[in-house]
Image (cartoon, coloured by chain):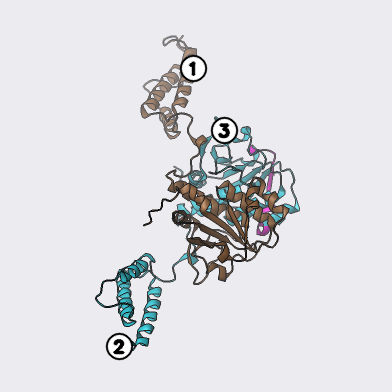
Chain colours: A cyan, B brown
Amino acid sequence: MTSVPSPPPLERLSRVRVVLHSPRHPGNIGAAARAMMTMGLSRLSLVKPERFPDDEAYRRASGARDLIDAIELHPDLDAAAAGCVAVVAVAARPREHAPVSMPPRELMPRLIELAAHGEVALVFGNETNGLGRAEVNRCDFLARIPTGGTYASLNLGAAVQVLCYELRMAAIAADGQGTGVLPGDALDSPLATHQQVEQLLAHAERTLVALDFLVPDRPSRLMERIARLARKSRLEQEEVSILRGVLAAAEALCGPPGNRRRSS
Amino acid sequence: MTSVPSPPPLERLSRVRVVLHSPRHPGNIGAAARAMMTMGLSRLSLVKPERFPDDEAYRRASGARDLIDAIELHPDLDAAAAGCVAVVAVAARPREHAPVSMPPRELMPRLIELAAHGEVALVFGNETNGLGRAEVNRCDFLARIPTGGTYASLNLGAAVQVLCYELRMAAIAADGQGTGVLPGDALDSPLATHQQVEQLLAHAERTLVALDFLVPDRPSRLMERIARLARKSRLEQEEVSILRGVLAAAEALCGPPGNRRRSS
């Protein structure tokens, strides 16, 4: 155990380097930068890019141009990953005798843990061939995105997006924030209690009787269906208030009991 | 409860329509098609695209050109989502009085459940403004991707990739396949048992004594450290065999006991 204090999980995202090994299209470098920045990552390195610098990288980076300006260029994978405590190769195909291979959903939480101890790297191969065997075998782990169907080749920027998203989700979970509920995801008002829903249903029944839509004391499946709808909807307190307001307005239209439309 | 048999979770992915509402760049239409196909989705609809058909859509679709050929064009969201049992708006910002909002990791498992009952749709807005309030309010749920830092705007194709990935992961989990372990992710051989690791450690100790690296019966932290390393490595049986082979080779070099280098 180390006694050096480690940053909280979400801050560890700044310890993750993304390394693109010999990328061919500068547009994908820009897409990778944008994908990283939306997930709170900032350190992008390139090994032997085919075309860089290039305006297309800036164009596709959109609001993440600062990451392009800060790109580090390295002659090989070892230089790009120097000082890292864990290096993950991202590849589509399995390799024999390669490092231990895991889906990103299992591996990214481990990487967030490892990032408590130092810098870590995610390494992506080029658009045509992915990472070569020599590069994969210099990494500590292999991450393979589960794909399906007849076409399994993710665009490079899209693969960076998925891995950075999983990293952020892992950091959010490690930080005790569950699945990433955002401020605006909160309910508008607290959920209604069981008693409030029962009172609403009683009010609804009274109103439907007043409207001559329901005959008192005659068995009907109608109230059961309405109750089922109200219960499954997980009503909020404000919604119960609105519905009771509507019921009260309908009751008022009917006039006082004994003065109903049909009976008058 | 319905008695109509529903397809297994992974097959339900074919019941998910992706709707791009007024996309501006044909390249993003192609990127969306590619993202979908890698995750096993196939039905792409467009509402009022700015430029379509367009060669750039085919170019960026790469191996998913068939999805571009099969694109359905619709005049509005209602037409694109006609017949769906659930429609999810994907948006970056929260909206007041909008449908219930959840992170994709919570909502996509629900959508896989709902797809047991019929077709469902994921609706994405355009690159500049996202979905308008009128469109969001015609949807049943709102999905917001957790983002971080100062730049939170995902590229349209990247957002489609994240949602389709979460859908596939949800289908894999619902299908009882956990986190998506792939065939090549399997270990090369079964994990070593506790007893096999103990035997390896005993063999290692004998060999280190033979090498005069360890003095018998004298306390040393060395074997403790070696044991710690062996245990945390989760050794496979084949790896134990290899290590014991190396130890045997080293022992053989030392000659029989009583005939050691130093003692001879």
**Residue interval drawn in magenta:** A62-77
Q: Which residue is mark 1?
A: B250
What amino acid is found at the position of numbered circle 2 in the picture? Ser
Which of the numbered marks, if any, corresponds to residue B21? Answer: none
The chain carrying label 1 is: B
The chain carrying label 2 is: A
Percent coordinates x, y for residue B139 in the rendering? 51, 65
What whole-number distance in Å separates the C-alpha atoms at marks 3 and 1? 31 Å
What amino acid is found at the position of numbered circle 1 in the picture? Ala
Taking A135 as reference, is B221 left or right? left
Q: Quadrant of the C terminus of chain A?
A: bottom left
Q: Nearer the viewer, residue A110 or A120?
A: A110
Q: Nearer the viewer, residue B51 or B170?
A: B51
For the residues labelled 3 and 1, say whether their Cβ atoms are less than 8 Å apart: no
Quarter occupied by residue A66: bottom right
For the residues labelled 2 and 1, say whether their Cβ atoms are less than 8 Å apart: no
What amino acid is found at the position of numbered circle 3 in the picture? Arg
Q: Quadrant of the N terminus of chain A?
A: top left
Q: Which residue is mark 3?
A: A95
Q: Nearer the viewer, residue A25 or A211?
A: A211
Q: Is residue A119 magenta?
A: no
